[in-house]
Image (spheres, rainbow, N blue to C red):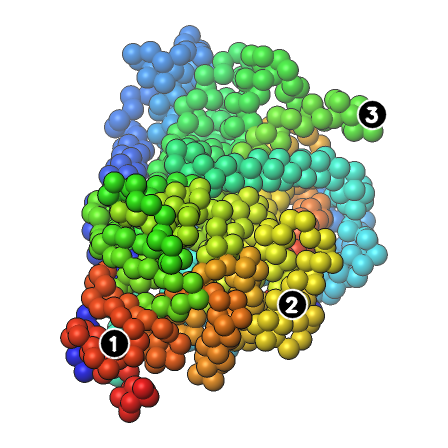
Amino acid sequence: MLSIIVRRLAISIVLILVVTFLTYLLQSFLPGDAARAMLGLTGSPDQYQAMRKALHLDEPLIVQYWLYLAGLLRFDLGNSIFTQEPVAHSLAVRSQVSASLVVGTTLVATLLGVGLGMLSVLRGGIIAKILDVFALIAWATPGFWLALLLTTAFSVAIPIFPAIGYIDFEKDLGGWAKSLVLPVAAMSVGGIAAIARITRESMSRELEKEYIRTLRASGVGTGSLVWKHALKNAGLTIITVIGLVFIGSMLGTIFIEQVFALPGLGSLLIDATRLHDIPVIQGVALAFTLTVVVVNLLVDLSYTWLNPKVRTS
Amino acid sequence: MSTIETTTEIVREERPRTQHFMGRLLRKPVALVAIGYLVLIIVLCLGAPIVSKYDPLVQDLYTIQSLPTGDHWLGTDALGRDVVSRLLYGGLVSLYGVGLALVVFAVVGISIGLLAGYTGGLVDRIISTTIEIVLSIPHLVIILAVLAIFGTGMTAPMITLGILACGGLARIVRANTVAAREELYVGAAKVSGLGSGRIIFRHILPNLTGPIIVQLSLFAGNALATQAGLAFLSLGVQPPDPSWGGMVGEASQVILQFPWLLVPSGGIIALTMIAFGLLGDAAREASFETHQRSAGIAVRHKIAPAGDGSAASSSGEDILSVDGLNISFQEAKEIKEIVKDISFAIRPGEIVGLVGESGSGKTVTGLALLDLLPANALVTAKASWFKNVNLQNPAEIKKIRGKGIAMIWQEPMVSLDPVFTVGSQLGEVIKLHNRQLSKAQVRQRAVELLKSVKIKEPEKVLKQFPHQLSGGMAQRVVIAQALAGDPELLIADEPTTALDVTVQADILDLLRDIRRERNMAILLITHDFGVVADLCDSVLVMRYGQIVERGEVVKLFTMPQHDYTRSLLAATPSLVKGTL
């Protein structure tokens, strides 16, 4: 048990180092440098040299990277080249939108996905076939396109939900919820299909196992076999996929926030990509990677809760 | 010793025979349609200058936002450009990106997987850990960083995608290579002095075709989604150059005035994705011979009376009486008869051995009595009674499971739910049969039951999980669980086969004690005449689904009538010396 957590933490640290180093390494390929970009064309050679020194651009790359890492420990992620705003601050401001989207999507996908999967296990036949077709179409439909179709239907043709924009939940809870409905709907379809499918597959696999037969032979009823025994055993697989859906929807915000003009981390990243604003890209990459690390850790911890073999070994 | 042929197994596992993989794949209509569509799209896009009479960039401001017409089959966009022409030219960009990512994904993934699987050891461990880390990287973020650095063009981001994602393919290739390396034919090839290269290309890779095609199809879909997403954000492809994702972006600009544009642009992405998905599904089906086994929860076939069904309950003396039981399985389109017209009876407290080779139908017979067969089983009987309970009525059987008849199996370790403690699952069964018991009383009863199956530290075992028990202990727990409802008949299917020899004798002793203490009848299913000699009062010998001989143990052992019985007896070494 402990060894799994230790291994996960070790891998997480390497993962963070790899991602930060990759994004750091990439900027050395950029023509010109941050000092030039910040000064614009008007800076004098002296100003340029001073700026380079201030940004440690005169040091070797590995030293710069080291200084960057040291900064991370003080929550100093550098400043945006264009707005000069501290990256850490932008991330904090923008993360509420993305968190609302991702958590909402994961919740919806989990509830509907597990529900649909269980329905298909219990009813079988036609529902299982419909689920297969739905899963294929959901996988094949790009989220940003689905988002546009939903907008056309539910904010243009039948204006129920806002087409664009985000409302702070502290200001207007109802408005906040309304502004999330379409983006969450567009993002969760794929997750619903994935979770429903894995629920059905893992449940069917568990229900064929011998412990189920033994319990049934002892008189245990279908309700307990399905909802207690098989579901807890299948839970391991299902939770893994829920973790993947969480991470997938986090990356999905990159496209969806553009469609709905939501000021989250995804649109921050796209703007930074268009502007070649490397410090911001590094910051978002770090935020996303940390989220991946935390999600993986939570999935691991849930294993230990669900699976006594892991817990007691 | 005569050879004993075995009849058809209930569940047939077929080894994937990948030599014929492509043949099987191309026989699937779904695969043909998917491949046909993809080839058509590729040909049309490559031939765009010939196929389309319109230039994708030329604007015709007199016919803007036109719905499909004879001239413009899919209409025109906001600048009057022909949608079909833009789809075809734009398809080239998308297909180039997908193709590039696919090549990188395949070459790097297969090479790394083969290297790790074929070399093994430290190299394997380093590669596997690296793959784990790379697959955790949020790919899209790195791809955007690459785009920020290298600016326009799909080349750099799609190569990056191929590299970052190929770990998934490498893992599958590695696993299959490790498995193939342990196969006999690769060992034989090595012994006969073939070089690594020949072994890999002649013996390992051909067997991997199926799983690789599955991964390639699904990755192609994901690559298309990524490529289209980037183009939608005008990254990688600059307007006015057409691309499928970019056309969705253009459509979104005029969504209020002309929503039609969303349909062809996103539609072709979704259709192409569906083709990739269908191809992947078909390839998965073709690479594994899947057999349809149902969960056995959803549909149940009724046990239909084959005779008049009006026979009275079991005659006074017998606790169980079965008359003319037939069991068959529906497999694909044929029906396989497993048990043919068998009849037998069991008296209270009697231990009856049901003996036969594997595949003779003895296990299936036990399962049929408690209605535990999978849904594709067809069970009929002239009459089948447990005391006054009609075993041809599933609803009746439900009421006696665990209470009238209980059942235990060969593998005790998998007969217990791995994620609940012994106390939890035993308690659930106790509570089920004695609803009025309080929590403390349930616990008390659990301790008593564990004591009755000779478990030394019942309090401790209650808190343990199945994987913490030895095989013998687990079988005792399973027996305790079976006893929780005070059954009058226990069906024990090879209860000692999977256990150590020393433990086997203990479990048989336990069964004997339980019979004595509770006057419980036992139907002991086994292939081992030694066990029969040890425990049973009478025997049924089963072969090819029929009972070929029956009788009292001593009589049958001393004067076997049927050749098959004789050969079984001769094949039991412990009996040759004359234990009787």
Q: Is B319 in front, or is B436? A: B319
- Alpha carbon separation for disc pair 3 and 2: 62 Å
Badge 1 sits on which subunit?
B
Question: Which image quarter: residue B273?
Answer: top left
Q: Is B150 in front, or is B11? A: B11
- Alpha carbon separation for disc pair 3 and 1: 88 Å
The residue at which mark 2 appears reads as B448
Lateral position of residue B342 relative to residue A125, left or right: left
Quarter of the image where the N terminus of chain A is located: bottom right
- Label of residue B556 in the image: 1
Nearer mark to the viewer, of 3 and 2? 2
Query: How many C-alpha atoms fall within 10 Å of the one at disc 3: few (<14), some, or many (≥20)?
Result: few
- Label of residue B428 in the image: none
Name the amino acid, label 1.
Leu
Counting residues from the N terminus, which is met first, the one under dot 2 or under dot 1?
2
Residue pictured at 62% horizontal, 13% vertical:
A159
Image marks 2 and 1: residues in contact by CB distance under 8 Å: no
Residue pictured at 78% horizontal, 50% vertical:
A78
Residue B26 visible, this angle = no
- Could you say where residue B430 lies in the image, as x and y percent from the top left? 61, 56
Question: In what element is the residue under mark 3?
Answer: loop
Have a look at marks 3 and 1 and say if they share a chain: no
The residue at which mark 3 appears reads as A171
Name the amino acid, label 2.
Glu
- Could you say where residue B360 lies in the image, as x and y percent from the top left? 26, 64
Lateral position of residue A13 relative to residue B245, left or right: right
Q: Is B263 in front, or is B457? A: B457
Q: Give the vertical position of B77 relative to B239 (above or below).
A: above
Q: Give the vertical position of A280 relative to B483 (above or below).
A: above
Outermost residue on the top side: it is B62
Have a look at marks 2 and 1 and say if they share a chain: yes
